[in-house]
Amino acid sequence: MSHWALVVVLVLAAPVLAGPPGQQEVEESLTCQCGCGLTVHSCNHLQCPSGEPMKDEIRRRIGAGESKETILASFVTEFGEKVLSSPTMQGFNLLAWVTPFAVILIAGLSIMIVVRRRVHQHPEAPIPTPAGLTDEMRARLERELTDIDHDT
């Protein structure tokens, strides 16, 4: 068996070899429903009326050999998707994950396009001269500017 085939087999077998999920891992994936806003594992209410029964059910299901996904799915069925500590990346939630990054990307590209257009649109304009400047005045101005350059 080649090295690559062995790697593929190990990667595919990893979930099976890992065994049942840990209690803490499942508890961290669920939000306590008591209103504290913490995960079931982190809820700091003594004898929490929501967190303690959830911990007991998680413990029972892990003991029965259920996978993390099955346990989470049962809690989603009972409480709705709000019970998950992090939203899934499906349906509307996928849009919620992607939108901020898309807006930042589009804004950055828009700014870059506007700046490039403005830079290329306005070449250096000639320095305007005052109206009514006679040739004599122009010659005197040039002499004085030359004298200033030589003095510095």
Image: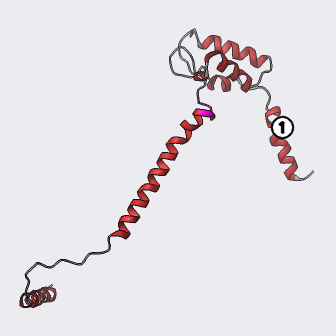
Identify whether 70 is placed above or below 98: above
Q: Secondary structure at mark 1?
A: helix
Which image quarter: residue 128? bottom left
Instruction: Indicate the position of residue 67 as horizontal and vertical percent values.
Output: 76, 25
Tell me the kind of residue under disc 1: Ala
User: Which coloring applies here?
Assistant: secondary structure
What's the residue at 36%, 67% (across, down)?
A: 119
Instruction: Indicate the position of residue 141 as horizontal and vertical percent values.
Output: 10, 86
Identify whether 116 is placed above or below 33: below
In the rendered structure, the answer to whether residue 94 lies left or right of residue 16 reads: left
Q: Which residues are magenta?
A: 85-91
Crowding around mark 1 (Cα neighbors within 10 Å: few <14, some 14 to 19, many 20+) is few
Identify whether 125 is placed above or below 21: below
Q: Which residue is mark 1?
A: 13
What's the residue at 93%, 50% (across, down)?
A: 1
In the rendered structure, the answer to whether residue 98 lies left or right of residue 21 reads: left
In the rendered structure, the answer to whether residue 26 lies left or right of residue 130 reads: right
SS assignment for the magenta stretch, majority: loop
Which image quarter: residue 76? top right
What's the residue at 58%, 26% (across, down)?
A: 85
In the rendered structure, the answer to whether residue 69 lies left or right of residue 40 reads: right
